[in-house]
Amino acid sequence: MTSESSGGTLHTKVLLIGGTGFLGRHVLNRLSTAGTDVTVVTRRPPAVPAGYEVAELDDRGPRRAQFASMINRFTPDAVVNTAGEIWRNDASLLQAANAQLPEQLALAMADTSSTARLVHLGSSLEYGSLPHPHATDESCPQEPRSEYGRSKLRGTRRIFEIAQQASLDVVVLRIFNAIGSNMSPASLLGKTVRTLEQARRDKRLARLTLFDLRQHRDYADARDLAEAILRATVSRRPVGAPVLNLGTGQASSAYDLVRGLALASEVEFTIDVLPAPEGGGRSLAADWQIADPTLARRHLDWSAARTLPETLRWIWRTAGEGQAHPIAGCPAEGTR
């Protein structure tokens, strides 16, 4: 799959689906710095940094045929799917982006008899919840409690069905709560950054609010996740497991996250904790969840390298650099 020049530069051709979303942009940056030849498949060509080849998705045409045409044209060694819908809690949008799009991509690879590796980004919320202090490994029940998680699981299962029929080389990397620079303003940290920035400009106390969800999650640095995705993409040998969990193996609360970012900003702040809303979407889908990253260490020689305080300092230091992923977005671009 991958060759190297005498200087050690990677010569992997990668078709990157959705490289303009939050995590997709970090993946694009890591693939590029590693020396891979990246073509970005997107509905938003202007959002792609200069210097990259772009293949534009057309809403008027069928996804399957468009993907097949791109695969035939670029003959990639690997196809990385970072596209998906996350913030709009609309069942039809979630289904289109998280289930139908990966299905159409896998079908296109089967249609073209592609030998490329398909690296698909799944979600920790494809699993059910476990009680404290248990960690989620790849054998845990797949019993998602949110429509987001159910749509992601439908996409994963459909990919594997097609892969089995067409002998595709597929690995699914289940992401546990990616955080990093330029997060969506709809996210907890995105909202916190904006509040802290405004308070700093106005030279006043930042009043931060969050729901009392009593959740603990596994928050992983987007740069560490992008490194794991790179390793799965350029590996010459079979990954060794069809699904790998990517996380730190440590849990933090939403309160810890907000307070840590506020401390990193050095802006004076207060935190108001509000009663949790009834019902709930993606954010209420798991009370306790941390990854067991054993298989990722074994098969990718990867583990999270950065601490949560380090990541929060990076998020604040880079606040305002570039344009955050828009709330509205589109079903083919948002990323876990």
Image: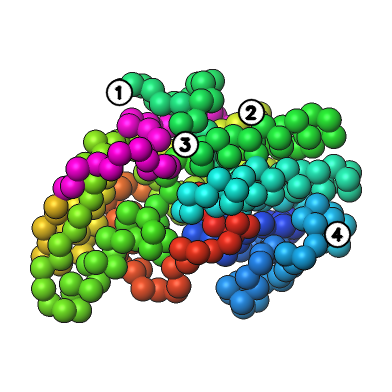
Name the residue type under label 1.
His
CA separation, marks 2 and 3? 26 Å
Sequence-wise first label, 2 or 3 = 3
Mark seen at residue 132: 1
Q: Secondary structure at mark 1?
A: loop
Q: Which residues are magenta?
A: 273-301
Residue visible at 58% across and 39% down in the picture = 151
Picture layout, residue 107 above or below residue 330? above
Disc 4 to disc 1, C-alpha distance = 47 Å
Mark drawn on residue 146:
3
Determine whether the residue tagged by mark 4 lies in a helix, strand or loop. helix
- Closer to the N terminus: mark 4 or mark 1? 4
Mark nearer the N terminus (1 vs 3): 1
Q: Earlier in the sequence, mark 3 or mark 4?
A: 4
Name the residue type under label 3: Ser
Q: CA distance from mark 1 to mark 3?
A: 20 Å
In the displayed structure image, the side of residue 333 where residue 312 appears, left or right:
left
Identify residue for label 4: 69
Secondary structure at numbered mark 2: loop
Q: Residues within 10 Å of mark 4 (few under 14, many from 20)?
A: some
